[in-house]
Amino acid sequence: MNRAGRSLRSRGLFLLTCAPLWGGCASLGTLETADTVPKGQSRLTAQAWVQGVDDGRKPGVLPQVAVAGRAGVTEGLDVGGRLSLQGAEGSLKLQLAGREEGSPFVMSVAPTAGVVLFSHAWEPGDWSSDTQLFVAVPLLFALRNPDGSQLVLGLRPTWMRFDALFDPESREMAAMGASLGYAFRVNPGLRVMPEAAMLLPVADRQQGQWARVSERPQLQFGIAFLMDPVR
């Protein structure tokens, strides 16, 4: 394959590897509130989302479901994980602002790393991808109501690597994501959070060189059911 052909395929790899209807892709949003789980408590979350994929040839919609959990380590810091049909991720969340009881504004950072496994890739041959490794650093900003409902805006710088971890032919991509969701308080132990998210590839690496790319954003619409212990 000549260099121009490799460049074209590399720049579309992010969308191509997420496109098989029997595969999957990492969640683009957080489906979480900006505040942390209190020390000694835990939260269980059921999540579902759909992603719109369009590589210019065959648009598609990918459904996905996951379960997630978080546990408070200390005030302002918790740990969590998410398990979906195709992969898993782990994260920390550090609350930077809004720890005071009744504070209307919350800000946090939630470093996340994970892996998505694929049974097939969009195209056959040497561009079949077995894994997608990713690292993201979401920044979460929220307006919080007294009942615990939250309007959450997320910014999500993301790095991805496709195929085997140490394969020299693996491709890497940098992207910027954003999400907007609202966690409605249903009762003292349950919040329901619809969320819209997008991820825009901005650069990829080929033969050791990073280059800017111009790709269509990937879109996601999801919903989460956040179950907290009743105090």
Image: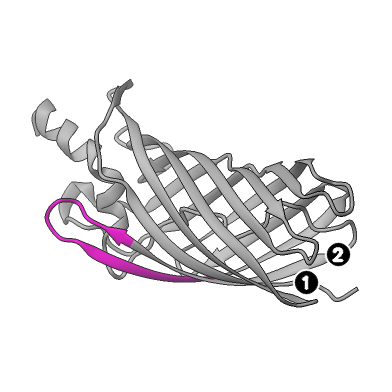
Q: Give, as a three-letter code, the residue at label 1.
A: Asp
Neighbour tally class for label 1: few under 14, some 14-19, many 20 plus, Cα within 10 Å? some
Residue range of the region highlighted in magenta in the rendering: 52-66
Residue drawn 51% across the image and 62% down it: 195
In magenta stretch: residue 54? yes
Q: Toward the viewer: 115 or 102? A: 102
The answer to whether the residues at label 1 and label 2 have Cβ atoms under 8 Å apart is yes
Q: Is residue 87 left or right of residue 220?
A: right
Q: Which residue is mark 2?
A: 41
Q: Is residue 42 left or right of residue 217?
A: right
Q: Secondary structure at mark 1?
A: loop
Q: Which residue is mark 1?
A: 228
Residue drawn 85% across the image and 46% down it: 99
Q: Determine whether 204 is above or below 29 in the image.
A: above
- Residue 156 drawn at (x, y percent): 52, 42
In magenta stretch: residue 59? yes
Q: Toward the viewer: 7 or 109? A: 109
